[in-house]
Image (cartoon, rainbow, N blue to C red):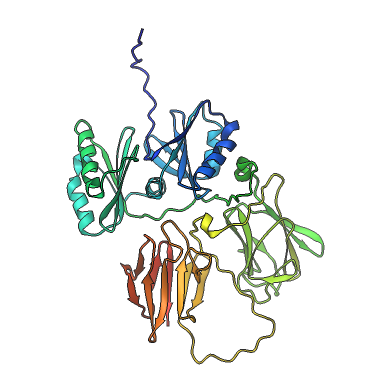
């Protein structure tokens, strides 16, 4: 005999995110299975991106995979999308009550569109009853905007994706049967008007399309077959400061940047005239830690050799003046494997400082070469344009290496032609702008501001 549902009990609502197909459904999920599940998702994401979803009725948790790396994490509760750390996902998963677990296969456009919902604030938030949706889409197309239009109602979610005023994707629930490009908008509107006939739908517009990896993302090398949960939940490394063989300070590296210098505003203050005001920093990047000299007068030595920027491993000894800093990884802390640019998008550019030889006699240049000045949280980085062509992109071989979602390996170039410097947008969906205006080719002038994704450069003659 069929039983009528209990009217007093509300059915848990699970938002169905866009996907190509369900790659796997994990029956009888338990935290003990998490390591194997994550490795399966990593393997799958080598070919196509995917995401792991855990839901127990109270909340949904998502872990996003791309190019065999764990890219980001997020949470949905009461239709609120929140960006989280990977650590938060793993801790929450261990406490969820008998969650359903599924792995969904997606493509880059679907993944990027979903991440925007978790990571960005909408430029517009309204209801279908308060706005003319046709008029909004007409305006986006006439102005040539790149944006995401999202419609939600209960467990339904649909995303219409615009790039330079053209609809390039419609993502909703099962997105494997995609219509022709010319009917993306029509199909989107039919679904929205059908569903909102009885109840208004929420409409959100996102104009900031730059997404990033989780703040605690770490490189996972092909050779790594250990415990991924320990990899992300392990204790952070620490350093010890020694003077004349005696330990005088110990500091846990639990923040992205640790400053070392002579003044008291540094995390490690060394009161010695041989130490610069800001002498060097220790910075974390995707699970690895680096020592970087901040153009100090007397330099920074790592294991007896002067360095600009170098990766730290267990037991490394850093010498600043007469003080020694030793790098330690705590018990159970996994050593991240070496990173490759192709494996993981970057949002921060790190350019090693080249240490000049001790003895060098160079002729005075006839004139100073034009340069690009990159603005970073750690100060300006200067790239002299001495070569006939300088490439910009996320390829390891690029002259100026940048990263980020939708940035190509060779995204742009600056070529010297007939005494002029010409900026060209070569590849990639990310716009190249000069003083706020998108360009394909542009003759650079002094103090032109160039922007590619989150990276900003100033051209100086």
Q: Quadrant of the N terminus?
A: top left
Residue 59 percent coordinates (x, y): 44, 33
Q: Is residue 160 above or below residue 349?
A: above
Give whichever of 369, 337 is nearer the camera.
337
Is residue 212 in sight in this rendering? yes
Residue at position x 44%, y 66% in the image: 410
Taking the image as shown, residue 446 lies to the left or right of residue 131, namely right
Taking the image as shown, residue 147 lies to the left or right of residue 382, namely left
Q: Is residue 155 above or below residue 411?
A: above
Is residue 448 in sight in this rendering? no
Residue 381 percent coordinates (x, y): 51, 72
- Which quadrant of the structure image shows residue 266? bottom right
Q: Is residue 163 above or below residue 412?
A: above
Give whichever of 116, 107 is nearer the camera.
107
Q: Residue furthest right?
A: 245
- Which quadrant of the structure image shows residue 295? bottom right
- Which quadrant of the structure image shows residue 130? top left
Residue 322 percent coordinates (x, y): 76, 70
Residue at position x 43%, y 56% in the image: 405
How many numbered marks have been drawn onto this rendered protein structure?
A: 0
Residue at position x 59%, y 72% in the image: 353
Q: Quadrant of the C terminus?
A: bottom left
Give whichever of 84, 255 is nearer the camera.
84
Residue 415 percent coordinates (x, y): 41, 78
Q: Is residue 452 above or below residue 203?
A: below
């Amino acid at each position: 005999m069929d039983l009528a549902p209990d009217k007093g009990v509300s059915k848990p609502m699970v938002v169905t995110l866009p996907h190509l197909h369900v790659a796997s459904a994990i029956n009888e999920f338990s935290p003990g299975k998490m390591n194997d599940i994550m490795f399966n998702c990593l393997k799958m994401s080598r070919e196509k991106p995917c995401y792991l979803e855990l839901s127990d009725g109270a909340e949904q948790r998502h872990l996003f995979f791309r190019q065999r790396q764990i890219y980001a994490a997020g949470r949905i509760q009461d239709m609120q999308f929140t960006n989280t750390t990977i650590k938060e996902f793993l801790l929450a998963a261990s406490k969820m009550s008998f969650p359903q677990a599924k792995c969904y296969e997606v493509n880059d456009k679907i993944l990027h569109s979903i991440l925007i919902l978790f990571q960005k604030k909408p430029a517009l938030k309204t209801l279908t009853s308060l706005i003319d949706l046709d008029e909004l889409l007409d305006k986006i197309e006439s102005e040539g905007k790149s944006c995401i239009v999202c419609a939600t109602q209960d467990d339904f979610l649909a995303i219409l994706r615009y790039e330079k005023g053209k609809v390039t994707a419609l993502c909703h629930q099962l997105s494997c049967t995609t219509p022709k490009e010319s009917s993306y908008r029509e199909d989107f509107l039919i679904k929205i008007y059908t569903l909102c006939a009885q109840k208004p739908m929420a409409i959100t517009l996102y104009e900031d399309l730059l997404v990033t990896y989780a703040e605690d993302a770490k490189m996972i090398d092909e050779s790594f077959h250990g415990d991924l949960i320990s990899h992300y939940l392990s204790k952070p490394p620490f350093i010890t400061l020694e003077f004349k063989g005696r330990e005088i300070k110990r500091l846990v590296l639990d923040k992205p940047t640790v400053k070392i210098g002579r003044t008291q505003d540094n995390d490690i203050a060394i009161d010695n005239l041989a130490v610069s005001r800001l002498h060097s920093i220790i910075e974390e990047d995707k699970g690895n830690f680096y020592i970087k000299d901040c153009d100090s007068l007397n330099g920074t030595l790592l294991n007896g050799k002067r360095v600009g920027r170098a990766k730290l491993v267990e037991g490394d000894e850093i010498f600043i003046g007469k003080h020694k800093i030793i790098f330690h990884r705590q018990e159970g802390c996994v050593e991240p494997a070496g990173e490759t640019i192709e494996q993981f998008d970057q949002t921060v550019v790190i350019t090693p400082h080249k240490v000049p030889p001790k003895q060098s006699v160079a002729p005075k240049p006839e004139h100073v070469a034009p340069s690009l000045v990159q603005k970073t949280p750690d100060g300006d980085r200067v790239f002299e344009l001495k070569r006939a062509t300088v490439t910009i992109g996320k390829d390891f071989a690029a002259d100026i290496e940048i990263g980020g979602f939708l940035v190509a390996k060779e995204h742009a170039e600056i070529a010297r032609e007939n005494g002029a410097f010409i900026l060209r947008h070569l590849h990639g969906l990310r716009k190249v702008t000069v003083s706020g205006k998108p360009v394909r080719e542009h003759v650079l002038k002094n103090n032109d501001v160039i922007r590619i994704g989150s990276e900003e450069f100033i051209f100086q003659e």
